[in-house]
Image (cartoon, rainbow, N blue to C red):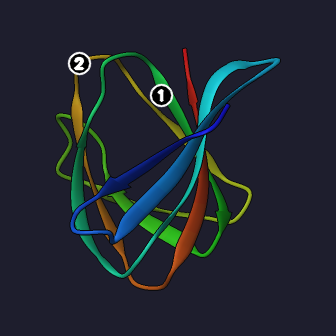
């Protein structure tokens, strides 16, 4: 069954599920800045909207829009800036 997750005072919400690719979450983020920590490799795909992302050990900010994705290694932190409501799919490896 699905697991409902809520973070940052309800500004980030997701549904966890399993599919043929393994564990995944499909979620939405409200406008704001968020720091996420990984416990395994994560592949984050923007479904709609855009994310401005500072990946681990980088001073560079990158923007990812609908259809684009990025990876974050296990046991790392990354920062996301959201300027419009954005939907994402995250695959856990």
In terms of secondary structure, where does tag 1 sit?
A: strand
**Direction from residue 21 to residue 60 in the image, left or right:** left
Residue 42 disc label: 1
- Badge 1: few (under 14), some or many (20 or more) residues near its Cα, within 10 Å? some
Figure check: 85 above or below 48: below
Which residue occupies 36% across, 82% down?
31
Q: Quadrant of residue 75?
A: top left
**Direction from residue 88 to residue 47 in the image, left or right:** right
- Place of residue 43 in the rendered image (x, y in percent of width and height, measured from the top left): 55, 32
Q: Which residue is mark 2?
A: 75
Q: Judge by depth and name the residue closer to the eye, 77 or 61.
A: 77
Q: Judge by depth and name the residue closer to the eye, 90 or 62.
A: 90
- Place of residue 2 in the rendered image (x, y in percent of width and height, measured from the top left): 63, 37
- Place of residue 18 in the rendered image (x, y in percent of width and height, measured from the top left): 69, 24
- Place of residue 90 in the rendered image (x, y in percent of width and height, measured from the top left): 57, 39
* Quadrant in the picture for the N terminus: top right
Which residue occupies 33% across, 72% down?
11
Looking at the image, the residue that sits furthest to the front is: 1
Figure check: 91 above or below 75: below
In terms of secondary structure, where does tag 2 sit?
A: loop
Residue 16 disc label: none
**Direction from residue 60 to residue 85 in the image, left or right:** right
* Quadrant in the picture for the C terminus: top right
């Amino acid at each position: 069954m699905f697991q409902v997750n809520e973070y940052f005072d309800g500004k980030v919400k997701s549904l966890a599920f399993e599919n043929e690719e393994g564990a995944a979450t499909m979620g939405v983020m409200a406008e704001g800045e968020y720091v996420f920590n990984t416990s395994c490799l994560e592949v984050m795909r923007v479904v709609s909207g855009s994310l401005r992302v500072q990946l681990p050990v980088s001073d560079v900010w990158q923007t990812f829009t609908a259809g684009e994705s990025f990876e974050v290694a296990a046991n790392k932190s990354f920062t996301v800036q959201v300027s419009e409501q954005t939907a994402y799919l995250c695959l856990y490896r």
